[in-house]
Image (cartoon, helix red, strand yellow):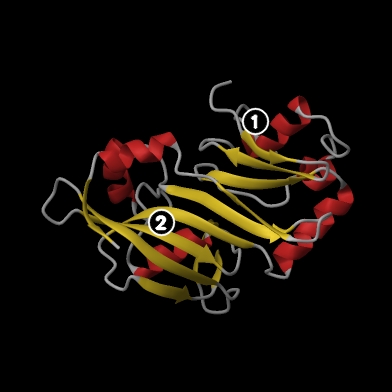
């Protein structure tokens, strides 16, 4: 299979893998016939919990189907619990890269707005009174210009302090700068136009930092933008570096 997950790091306790866009993280009834990271782990790698469906073959967290980048995989139930606890206690630091519509003038900022499932559309989430606390910080990396007079884009590095479903996508929509090619939150007309030149959601999980379950020290791993997203940027004119 083309574009299989790549192992960035491996030791006796865990794996750090680079998930390609188009891969679903966990097995589900709706994932039949599609590439799934959990299935790939159980078929291709042999370690103590590689076939344990109860704890997702060791997959500690998840990425949306079209989001590429870093995933953590535990090799034992003890490591799985240890890493999940770090996520729950917000001790894991993650960063993402996204290209959004518009020019964000504030080069450093944060978005703090509660996120919840929309009562009138249960497969969607949004900023919702009574939703769960959510905080995303960001730094502008660069500005780009498209072909149209008003086609400006901002490349961002994002730091979610919480891990709500679709948090980054929702927060950027809420700020007024939806992610390029986001079929859920950018609007149908906008995303359809985007997909002519950017065939998938422009969101990449670029780095992760956490306490190693055996060594006890902080470790950090990085994943550069995938080749398909780099190709998208080449179609635009970079106008400002920050």
Image coordinates for residue 35, horizontal then vertical, percent? 61, 30
Q: Which residue is drawn at 55% across and 72% down?
A: 134
Nearer to me, 143 or 126: 143
Q: Residue at x 69, y 60 (%)?
A: 210
Q: Which residue is drawn at 58% across and 20% down?
A: 1
| Sequence-first disc among 1 and 2 | 1
Q: Distance between the residues labelled 1 and 2?
A: 25 Å
Q: Quadrant of residue 52?
A: top right
Q: Which residue is drawn at 52% across and 35% down?
A: 22
Q: In this view, does 140 lie above or below 69?
A: below
Image coordinates for residue 73, horizontal then vertical, percent? 73, 45
Location of mark 2 (residue): 185
Image coordinates for residue 59, horizontal then vertical, percent? 73, 45
Image coordinates for residue 12, horizontal then vertical, percent? 83, 41
Q: Residue 147 carries which label?
A: none
Nearer to me, 168 or 239: 239
Question: CB atoms at circles 1 and 2 under 8 Å apart?
Answer: no
Q: Position of 187 compared to 6: left or right?
A: left
Quadrant the C terminus occupies: bottom left
Mark 1 neighbour density, 10 Å: few (under 14) some (14–19) many (20 or more): few
Of all residues, the one furthest to the top in this rendering is: 1
Nearer to me, 49 or 157: 157
Q: Quadrant of residue 173?
A: bottom left
Q: Which mark is residue 32?
A: 1
Q: Under tag 2, what secondary structure?
A: loop
Q: Is residue 200 above or below residue 132?
A: above
Q: Under tag 1, what secondary structure?
A: loop
């Amino acid at each position: 299979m083309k574009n299989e997950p790549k192992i960035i790091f491996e030791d006796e306790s865990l794996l750090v893998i680079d998930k390609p866009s188009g891969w679903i993280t966990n097995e589900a009834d709706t994932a039949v016939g599609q590439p799934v990271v959990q299935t790939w782990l159980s078929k291709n790698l042999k370690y103590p919990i590689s076939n344990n469906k109860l704890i997702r073959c060791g997959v500690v967290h998840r990425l949306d189907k079209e989001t590429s980048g870093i995933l953590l995989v535990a090799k034992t139930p003890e490591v799985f619990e240890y890493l999940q606890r770090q996520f729950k206690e917000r001790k894991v630091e993650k960063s993402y890269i996204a290209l959004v519509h518009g020019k964000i003038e504030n080069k450093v900022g944060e978005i703090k707005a509660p996120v919840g499932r929309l009562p009138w559309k249960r497969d969607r989430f949004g900023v919702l009174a009574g939703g769960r606390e959510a905080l995303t910080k960001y730094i502008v990396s660069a500005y780009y210009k498209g072909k149209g007079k008003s086609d400006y884009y901002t490349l961002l590095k994002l730091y979610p302090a919480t891990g709500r479903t679709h948090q980054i996508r929702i927060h950027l929509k809420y700020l007024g700068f939806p992610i390029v090619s986001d079929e859920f939150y950018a609007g149908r007309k906008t995303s359809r136009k985007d997909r002519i030149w950017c065939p998938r959601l422009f969101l990449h999980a670029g780095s992760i930092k956490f306490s190693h379950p055996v060594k006890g020290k902080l470790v950090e791993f990085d994943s550069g933008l995938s080749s398909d997203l780099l190709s998208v940027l080449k179609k635009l004119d970079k106008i400002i570096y920050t």
